[in-house]
């Protein structure tokens, strides 16, 4: 029997080729790193169950632009590749067209251990995140920087959204008055009227 | 997942050649898809367990009115627990069966009470991801562990023809044993058993199952090849019906997560909670490639009651209504779910040959919910779904409020083989004569029993129990299938007794020189349903005036 869990969140890693999506995924799911670059064939996903506030959350993380059912999306760029950062805007447009409007987004600037080759400053990353109203982190899959934090942040943001949604979206009706007299239920069909006889 | 492969070339795979996939690449992708399927199966089962849990709590709930706790049924008052109102369902509940919650809102937090059903439902919405998907995702109800082999056998058997009901006690033990002795279920044989009314299932539920059996319908419409074809396809579709597995739907319809309904609810609840006819939950999908419209009828909630015990025996009839009238000659009927006002249908109907422009040009999917009774199908509610948006947007799952009766509902109720014709009778309790006056007005579409293509009908009447033991016969109308009688008969009785008495009517074909042929029967009384019960009750409630009503005749003999 599979491990039990309370929630299943489907997350997505998207970004240009070679920014390190698979490496981030690998670091998070297996805590390992592989320097050889193997382009992912088509699709791949990994699973890891984390615990937040005593709830087990199973994360299914895809490295594909397969938006259906995704609750959270990590937008990844490479801080040493200007082009990958510029393309983030295209990716966001892509998300807006295809993913659910409720999807939780986050921006990651990967390969932050390669500071000497940096082309995109941290400030520009932060600026872009503020522009879209999403969170931002610089990560390194190789040096294991912020990978764990990024996924936990995204997962807890989704969880918070869920709790907010389930509490707020219900009709507010002015408190839990203890009504002394409940109005008699209307007869819902002619049958109930007949049976009074 | 393959459908999105074309998008990949915009991402990290953009640098790769855009030729066909290598075998090993295909293998890798297939492996990922398989892994994903395993995960999704496990998830469907998990969601199924969560859904089942809430359904079980719902089934156990007492639900006996505003003066009692919704769950445990304890009455409120000085001695009993104090009464709380659940914030979601607005039903009264005791403190033991509810939880207090700090609800965060735009105006700050406030404390609310939730009954166990609603709090568990909220929890289920969280755990299944329904909060995000705005509906319960696909799920499978886990198989019962006890007598699982027997269950699976029964399932396979039930799929052959019997309605599958989770909440209903099947008392058809005899037929079950009979079937289990033979490993292969012969559907043909079994259906004939149903036809002859020998199946204990039929008698146990007191339904004229013979009327609605697909095989019967097929024989009747055998001349019409096109409708025959569709019948067949529908039948296979209903065999593959996801009876227990892989069904989709939300447990509670009152708790809609969509933005629109939350907007409605804030300016005044009630508008979407309790409509007069209840709700129908269904999903509709149009495949342009195959020109098929798939419609899954999932469940209905809060249907009107049809008998004195507060139940109904609902089933659905569905058709596509084009601007020129109903598309299929025959309305598709689901199985009947007995003794409930909250039926689970879980049946799939497939309409073939549905052209795209039919959808755009104002066609509607029409679902009529009717009460199954041998003397007529009474109206419980109708759902009309405009198909134009379905065409443009793919699978649609929705919960629609049921609407009032119209001409198409009458067409649906009267479609299907009412082989024995109809009878118009009027009842009046005459207070001066202290008797029930029964006026036989006329019959239509009676069966032809004579070689000349007609019958020579007359009507026999009696009351049961009747202290006078009176029996009446109408005059004989020769050579007709639509006789007009206009004859009155009086049974001496008291209004109080009338509630416990039955009026038995049988129509016969007069044959000289041999025994008369049976043409049909009708029983009216306090345990009738729907329109028949209404006529009976009206007659008691409003004496000294005639209450007229059409009824369908049944083929069932009334024993002496």
Image (cartoon, helix red, strand yellow):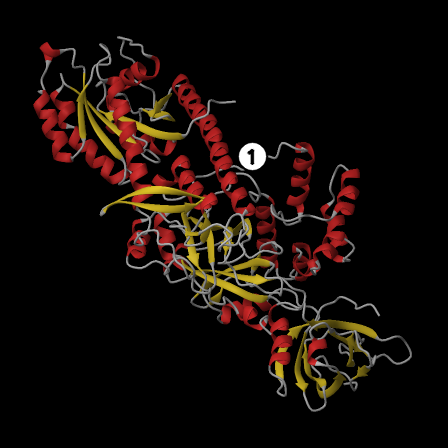
User: Which residue is at a point 62% across and 55% down the rendered structure image?
Assistant: B338
In the displayed structure, A117 sits above or below B436; it is above
Regarding residue B527, the answer to whether it shows in the image is yes
Q: Quadrant of residue B489?
A: bottom right
Whether residue B512 sits left or right of residue B526 in the image: it is right
- Label 1's element? loop
Image point (58%, 72%), residue name = A196
Q: Position of residue B384 (x, y in %)?
A: 44, 61
* Residue carrying label 1: B142
For the residue pair B84 and B340, the one nearer the viewer reads as B84
Compared with residue B554, is residue B218 higher up or lower down, i.e. above or below? above
Spot occupied by residue B321 in the image (x, y as percentages of width and height): 46, 63
Image quarter hosting the C terminus of chain B? bottom right
The part of the image, by quadrant, that contains residue B436 is bottom right
Q: Which quadrant of the structure image shows residue B104?
A: top left
Q: In this view, does B478 lie to the left or right of B46?
A: right
- The spot of residue B72 in percent (x, y) is 53, 48
For residue B128, above or below residue B249 = above
In the visual, does B40 lie left or right of B238? Answer: left
The front one of B356 and B472 is B472
Give the residue at the far right of this rendering.
B513
């Amino acid at each position: 029997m599979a491990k039990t869990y309370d929630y299943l969140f489907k997350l997505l890693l998207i970004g240009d080729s070679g920014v390190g999506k698979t490496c981030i995924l690998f670091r998070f799911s297996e805590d390992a790193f592989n320097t050889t670059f193997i382009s992912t064939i088509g699709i791949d996903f990994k699973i890891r169950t984390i615990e937040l506030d005593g709830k087990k959350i199973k994360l299914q993380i895809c490295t594909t632009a397969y938006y259906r059912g995704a609750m959270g999306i990590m937008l990844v760029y490479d801080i040493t590749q200007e082009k990958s950062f510029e393309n983030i805007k295209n990716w966001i447009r892509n998300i807006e067209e295809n993913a659910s409007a409720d999807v939780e987004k986050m921006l990651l600037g990967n390969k932050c251990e390669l500071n000497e080759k940096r082309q995109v400053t941290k400030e520009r990353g932060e600026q872009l995140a503020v522009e879209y109203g999403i969170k931002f982190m610089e990560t390194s899959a190789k040096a294991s920087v912020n990978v764990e934090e990024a996924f936990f942040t995204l997962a807890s943001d989704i969880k918070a959204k869920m709790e907010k949604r389930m509490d707020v979206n219900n009709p507010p009706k002015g408190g839990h008055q203890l009504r002394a007299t409940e109005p008699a239920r209307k007869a819902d069909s002619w049958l109930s009227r007949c049976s009074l006889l | 997942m393959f459908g999105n492969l074309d998008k990949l070339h915009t991402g990290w795979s953009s640098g790769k050649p855009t030729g066909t996939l290598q075998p090993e690449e295909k293998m890798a992708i297939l492996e990922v898809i398989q892994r994903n399927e395993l995960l999704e199966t496990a998830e469907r089962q998990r969601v199924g367990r969560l859904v089942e849990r809430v359904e079980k709590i719902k089934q156990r709930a007492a639900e006996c009115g505003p003066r009692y706790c919704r769950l445990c049924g304890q009455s409120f008052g000085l001695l009993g627990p104090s009464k709380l109102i659940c914030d979601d369902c607005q039903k009264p509940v005791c403190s033991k069966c509810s939880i207090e919650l700090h609800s965060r809102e735009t105006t700050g937090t406030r404390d609310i009470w939730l009954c166990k059903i609603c709090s568990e439902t909220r929890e289920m919405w969280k755990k299944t991801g329904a909060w995000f998907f705005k509906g319960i995702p696909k799920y499978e109800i886990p198989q019962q562990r006890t007598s699982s082999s027997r269950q699976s056998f029964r399932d396979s058997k039930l799929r052959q023809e019997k309605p599958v009901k989770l909440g209903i006690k099947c008392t058809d033990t005899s037929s079950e044993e009979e079937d289990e002795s033979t490993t292969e279920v012969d559907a043909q044989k079994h259906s004939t058993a149903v036809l002859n009314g020998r199946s204990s299932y039929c008698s146990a539920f007191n339904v004229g199952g013979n009327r609605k059996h697909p095989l019967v319908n097929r024989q009747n419409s055998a001349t019409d090849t096109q409708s025959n074809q569709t019948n067949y396809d529908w039948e296979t579709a209903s065999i593959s019906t996801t009876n227990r597995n892989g069904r989709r739907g939300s447990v509670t319809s009152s708790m809609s997560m969509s933005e629109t309904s939350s907007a409605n609810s804030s300016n005044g609840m009630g508008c979407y909670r309790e409509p007069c006819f209840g709700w129908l939950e269904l999903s509709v999908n149009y495949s342009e490639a195959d020109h098929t419209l798939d419609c899954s009828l999932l469940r209905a909630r809060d249907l009107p009651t049809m008998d004195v015990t507060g139940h109904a025996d609902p089933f659905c009839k569905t058709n596509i209504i084009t601007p020129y009238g109903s598309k299929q000659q025959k309305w598709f009927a689901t199985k009947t779910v007995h003794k409930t006002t909250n039926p689970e249908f879980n049946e799939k109907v497939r309409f073939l040959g549905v052209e795209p422009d039919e959808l755009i040009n104002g066609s509607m999917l029409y679902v009529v919910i009717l009460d199954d009774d041998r003397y007529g199908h009474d109206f419980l509610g109708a759902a009309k779904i405009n198909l134009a948006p379905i065409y443009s947007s793919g699978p649609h799952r929705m919960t629609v409020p049921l609407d009032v009766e119209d001409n198409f509902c009458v067409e649906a109720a009267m479609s299907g083989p009412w082989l024995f014709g109809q009878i118009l009778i009027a009842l009046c309790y005459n207070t001066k004569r202290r008797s029930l006056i029964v006026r036989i007005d006329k019959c239509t579409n009676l069966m032809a029993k004579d070689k000349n293509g007609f019958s020579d009908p007359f009507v026999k009447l009696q009351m049961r129990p009747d202290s006078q033991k009176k029996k009446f016969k109408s005059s004989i109308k020769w050579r007709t299938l639509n006789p007009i009688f206009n004859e009155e008969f009086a049974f001496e009785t008291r209004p109080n007794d009338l509630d416990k008495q039955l009026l038995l009517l049988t129509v016969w074909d007069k044959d000289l020189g041999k025994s008369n042929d049976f043409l049909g029967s009708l029983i009216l009384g306090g345990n009738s349903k729907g329109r028949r019960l209404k006529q009976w009750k009206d007659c008691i409630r409003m004496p000294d005036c005639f209450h007229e009503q059409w009824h369908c005749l049944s083929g069932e003999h009334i024993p002496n």
